[in-house]
Image (cartoon, grey):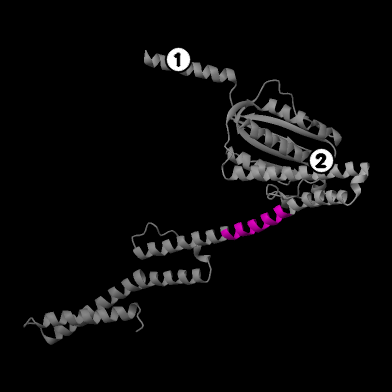
Amino acid sequence: MFLNSRVVALVLAVVVAAVTTAFLSLVPEVSDQALLVAALLSFAATYLLLYITFEFLVFKEIGEIYKVLNKMRKKDFSFIDAGDSSNTNNPLKRINREIYNYGVNRNKEIEDLRRLEVFRREFLADVSHELKTPVFAAQGFVHTLLDGAVDDKKVRMKFLKRAAKSLDNLDSLIHDLLTLSQIEIGEIKMHLEHFDIVRTAHEVIDQLENKVEKKGLEIGLDNEYPDPIFVHADAERIYRVLINLISNAIKYTHKGRIGLGFEVKGNEVRVFVRDTGVGIPTEDLDRIFERFFRVDKSRSKDSGGTGLGLAIVKHILEAHDTHVGVVSTVNKGSVFSFKLPIGQSTEEMEEEANQELELLEVKDA
């Protein structure tokens, strides 16, 4: 039997009218005409009241629920912009809203799973490709030596050096993969301390100076910083961040200068690395921090690197509750920057500790 608000209201109205007429008929003074009027009035009032109640408070909401369920079955999530009914007293509206929320959450989970699946496939393909390159190169050199080239001293040394370089690249790749994995799963904890970022910058510049000179570039601080600038962060990890950013700048800069600078504002220190390199196209800016992503794959291969440097930078800075930003213009250069909380010198920390000690002594007294 097909039920809707009209049928239900009609059946119940007939029942109510019949019961009302039956009770009134028990009263002797009530005429047949009065019974007929009472039956009609009770029927009409009951029908209208029940029809409005069922149509707008029950069946309409049930119909909306079925629409949502059908859309979810067809994987149509266009209903997710529905208004918020969480404050209504109508339980059916609340159920409807719960179904909306369920659909939103399930849709988000499905999209996340699809995105992760695509990422997993791409990551496995990238890792396989990156591992094959140095392995096959070293394998080729070694097999060439085994096939007889080992007897030629000049060729032997040349091939051994190339095989060693390929294995060194393989070792760097594996090390970066392990580092990235450990940071992501939280195995590597940030050991926060107060240190002079200017001194760290000088150490990084000294470390990479030979590489810069071989390319005929210049490197240095953008200004003189006679006074130390203290930050509160993991000194070892921030050193790694600067090494990766400057190494990346060296690879993509063919002439000009690489500058490292600082800007103190309030309780933060902005650190930036500026180069005069090839720059990054606008469409690639959102992807340069992905694993193995290279703006120019052929040129990047010749420049070396594992393709994980900027990904490691991103994760280290996120572990410091900050992020790395980039502004770049093609053929003019790029500026990478990040912020760190300002730190204290040893003297300032000692002075603060002495003040706290004095306060405790005063309280005890």
Percent position of residue 91, x then y: 34, 63
- Viewed as shown, does residue 153 lie left or right of 191? right
Amino acid at pointer 2: Thr
Tell me if residue 296 can be seen.
Answer: no
Q: Residue furthest left?
A: 28
Residue bearing the label numbered 2: 253
Q: Is residue 278 above or below residue 216?
A: below
Percent position of residue 340, x then y: 61, 33
Q: Say which quadrant the C terminus sits in.
A: top left
Residue bearing the label numbered 1: 358
Main SS, magenta residues:
helix
Badge 1 marks a residue whose secondary structure is helix
First along the sequence among labels 2 and 1: 2
Badge 2 marks a residue whose secondary structure is loop
Q: Quadrant of residue 233?
A: top right
- Viewed as shown, does residue 348 lie left or right of 10? right
Magenta span contains residue 90: no
Amino acid at pointer 1: Glu
Q: Say which quadrant the N terminus sits in.
A: bottom left
Q: State the CA–CA distance, disc 2 to disc 1.
A: 55 Å
Q: Nearer the viewer, residue 349 or 67?
A: 349
Q: Which residues are magenta?
A: 113-128
Percent position of residue 138, x then y: 81, 48
Bin the neighbour count of mark 1 within 10 Å (Cα to Cα): few under 14, some 14-19, many 20 and up. Answer: few
Percent position of residue 12, x then y: 25, 79
